[in-house]
Amino acid sequence: MSAIAKIPANEVLTLFLSHLSGERRLAEKTVEAYQRDLSSFLGFLSAHLDKALTLPDLVNLKATDFRAFLAHKRRGDSPLSAASMQRHLSAIRTFYRYMQRRWDVRNNALPLIKGPRVKKPLPKALSVQNAKDLITAGSFDDGPGWIAARNEAVLTLCYGAGLRISEALGLTWADMPLGDRLVLTGKGGKQRVVPILPVIRKAVEHYLSLCPHPMLADQSIFRGVRGGAMSARTIQGEVQKLRRALQLPESATPHALRHSFATHLLAGKGDLRTIQQLLGHASLSTTQRYTDVDAAALMDIHKKAHPRA
């Protein structure tokens, strides 16, 4: 390491940025973000250690040095959010992986550093009325009626049974006719049983009675205009047109109907453990996010309705 012992830290950063733009061909904006975050990191360390940094200084940083930088970012004049701090830490880790590959050097303290926990955003559920409007609208195009029936059937499965889009589009002729329950294999090969309401069966049967394309046992029942399997992008595009026509919020997506399924069940006093099973969540903590959604909705109603709000 003696031959590179005096490489200034800023030169190391320049080489790293050149690597990102040249060898990895990252977008210009992405490289600029790395430059901002890492320049901030090196600038802090230079003041913190009161010296012009070199490569050995970066290699020999202690856990307290990294934590001092994160504390500085958290308590500075413009405190960063947890997500922004995680982004800074990710940039630093990438920077150190580059140094390890290029100069065979390793900092033993960095793996010990954990950033702040980023709170996952609350699922964006629709109101009951907005969910109904989105489903029953079907289609505003002047195309064949079976397209509107198809859209309604897919969205009814998402809202009425809490299916993921991929699960709804994965239904085949072998799954027909629908009974009062459906066995699904979701993420991670996890199986679950979901009840099928009469309104769901009716929507699917109506679509099948109108669909002009032949059905095969191993093919999806939901078809595109030309007869091929319907893609998730197609239903997302259909819903985008519907929400514009209905003046619904941007959060009105097919997946939002699955969130709405869980949130509305919870609001109706549904048991959290049962909702977990219906959604196919591996962890109850994932389902518990919906309690925050319900609480947030109650607070919003209180704020709008209370005479002293």
Image (cartoon, rainbow, N blue to C red):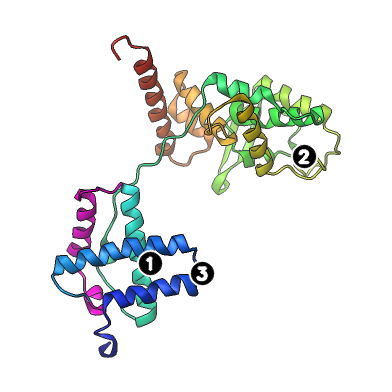
Q: Report the magenta residues as a range.
A: 54-81
Tell me the SS state at disc 2. loop
Q: Position of residue 295 (x, y in %)?
A: 37, 24
Residue type, label 3: Arg
| Res 170 seen here | no
Which mark, by number, is residue 205? none
Tag 3 residue: 25
Residue type, label 2: Arg
Going by the image, does 119 lie left or right of 269? left
The correct choice, above or below, for 65 with respect to 103 in the image is above
Tag 2 residue: 223
Q: Nearer the viewer, residue 193 or 296?
A: 296
The correct choice, above or below, for 111 with respect to 163 in the image is below
Residue type, label 1: Thr
Tag 1 residue: 94
Asked which quadrant contains residue 226, the reply is top right
Closer to the N terminus: mark 3 or mark 2? 3
Q: Which residue lies furthest to the top in this view?
A: 307
